[in-house]
Image (tube, rainbow, N blue to C red):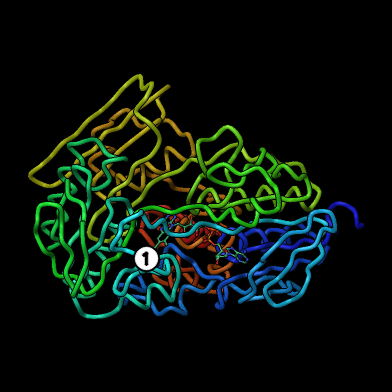
Amino acid sequence: MSGPGAERIVVVGHGPAAHRLVERLAHHGHRGEVTVLGAEASAAYHRPLLTSVLDGSLAAGALRLPAPPDGTRLRPGVTATAVDRRRRLVQGSDGHGYPYDRLVLATGAAPLVPPLPWARRADGRLAPGVRVLRTLPQCEQLTGPDPVAVVGGGPLAIEAALALRRRGRDVTLVHRGPYPLDRHLEARAGQLLSARLRALDVDLCTGRTAEAYRSGKLRLDDGRWVAAGDVLLCTGVVPRTGLARSAGLAVRTGVVVDDELRTTDPRIHALGDCAQPAGATGPHLGHAAAWEQAEVLAALLSGSPARWTGTHAVLRLRAREVDLMRLGTPDGAEETVVLSDAARGRYARLSLRDGRVSGAVLLGPGRAVATVTRLYRRGEPVPADRLALLLGAPIDYAGERLPDEAPVCHCNNVTGADLTAAWCAGARTVPELAAATRATTGCGGCADDVRSWCAARARGEESG
Ligand SMILES: Cc1cc2nc3c(=O)[nH]c(=O)nc-3n(C[C@H](O)[C@H](O)[C@H](O)COP(=O)(O)OP(=O)(O)OC[C@H]3O[C@@H](n4cnc5c(N)ncnc54)[C@H](O)[C@@H]3O)c2cc1C
């Protein structure tokens, strides 16, 4: 066997977590062979931008992530079907065995289909017209013109409903809770969000469940029939753990890992949506955690010490019509500032500990969302004028450097180093930087950062 930094690595899965891991292995100088088995036929793509394909604003090809480093052995369309831990061999659906020194499970998560009798056929497949949204082919099934019912009340349900509206489809959102995002938002914010969705022509049916689906109509539990050529289930995800389980690794909701992302077999690691840190109630779902875990694991597999200590997770709605963000927790706050402005559809709750953001809910304006997110992620003190902050007053970041290796644009995985490279290649304005790197083109939360960075660079060039 080869030593640390030169081991033969097999990665199972080729989603954002695996893609980032492979890129960072090269960055850290890993010298061993890296093989990636990906069940999907296409090259790795940026899953959070699927709703931009859904609304027609991006072509499917625009989601593709950059090609992996030279020498990476990619096996698209190959599913890992078994792991022989004794022989350290992964069995592929192509009939090949893939030997490893280290195995990384990046199998992600699959849509959770609740046990609704109308949602599946007898053979277990989804009933005609019933859809889920996790992959590009599933996205392409949703481009018809008919009215659509979206079932669910989480971020994906709202983003999908708004994307389908933008595409011109009539949309009904059916949610059993009292308002969308009821697991994330206090009631006042939820009411304002509901009003905003209705103003955007989303037919909102809250406190309702769907009881039957036939002939293009969905029946709700109050007897109402809703026209729905498609029913899109956005009812959660379930980590893909089958491979780990059958290999005898410890699995709870996700594959259990320690702070070095090791499973109960020290030669096998897991990261991203399939991995559950020991002691956590479930996986840290989401792009930010996947990225940070990839960074830690790449360092470790390249022979450098690293630990994963958790992620500053931020829920941000990816929809240009609604600027909504929730982060941290209100628990244990020493100071709470609440602003509720129903006439303009704005709501803000800022929870502070030690003068820093410990939790927040913000429904518009965009600049406040971006600034509070930034203060939270960096643990910086909040300005004395809390109200001005919540109303979106700009903060001067002049002269400040953006971190080279950490993401600036979380939607598109753009780092400070990527922006610098684009600048050096001639991009001098925010639109030019956006065209070169895709920064600012996702939720827009990094727009202020990129604008200030761009202005500071320009000043630097002038004075230099
Ligand atoms: C529409 C949409 C919007 C989203 N928006 C956001 C957002 O705004 N912010 C956010 O943080 N997150 C968002 N997410 C979630 C985000 O996409 C996931 O957290 C992220 O994709 C997790 O990456 P991953 O690589 O761990 O898993 P995945 O992206 O699920 O990729 C896993 C890959 O492994 C493959 N695979 C599974 N089993 C095997 C096997 N046995 N052999 C070979 N290959 C296998 C799968 O086919 C898949 O391609 C969104 C998701 C969707 C669908």
Q: Is residue 231 visible?
A: yes
Examine the image and state in which quarter residue 50 appears.
bottom left
Q: Quadrant of residue 54?
A: bottom left
> Which residue is labeled 1 in the image?
132
Q: Is residue 88 left or right of residue 246?
A: right
Residue 230, image x, y percentages: 25, 72
Secondary structure under tag 1 reads loop
How packed is label 1: few (under 14 Cα within 10 Å), some, or many (20 or more)?
Answer: many
Query: Which residue is pictured at 22% across the width and 60% down the height?
Result: 321
Please tell me whether residue 339 is drawn above or below residue 415 in the rendered image.
above
Looking at the image, residue 45 sits to the left or right of residue 321; the answer is: right
Q: Is mark 1 within 8 Å of ligand 1?
A: no
**As drawn, is 128 to the left or to the right of 73?**
left
Q: Position of residue 435 (x, y in %)?
A: 44, 73
Quarter of the image that includes the C terminus: bottom right
Answer yes or no: is residue 429 visible.
Answer: no
Q: Residue at x 43, y 59 (%)?
A: 111
Q: Nearer the viewer, residue 445 or 208?
A: 208
Task: Look at the picture and state if 112 lies above or below 383.
Answer: below
> Along the line of sight, which residue is nearer the eye, 459 or 63?
63
Q: In terms of image quadrants, where is residue 119?
A: bottom left
Q: Amino acid at mark 1?
A: Val
User: In the image, what residue occupies the spot 53% across and 67% down?
Assistant: 423
**Residue 126 appears at what percent x and percent y?**
37, 68
Vertical side of 242 occupied by 258: above or below: above
Q: Among all residues in the image, which is located at the extreme right?
A: 1
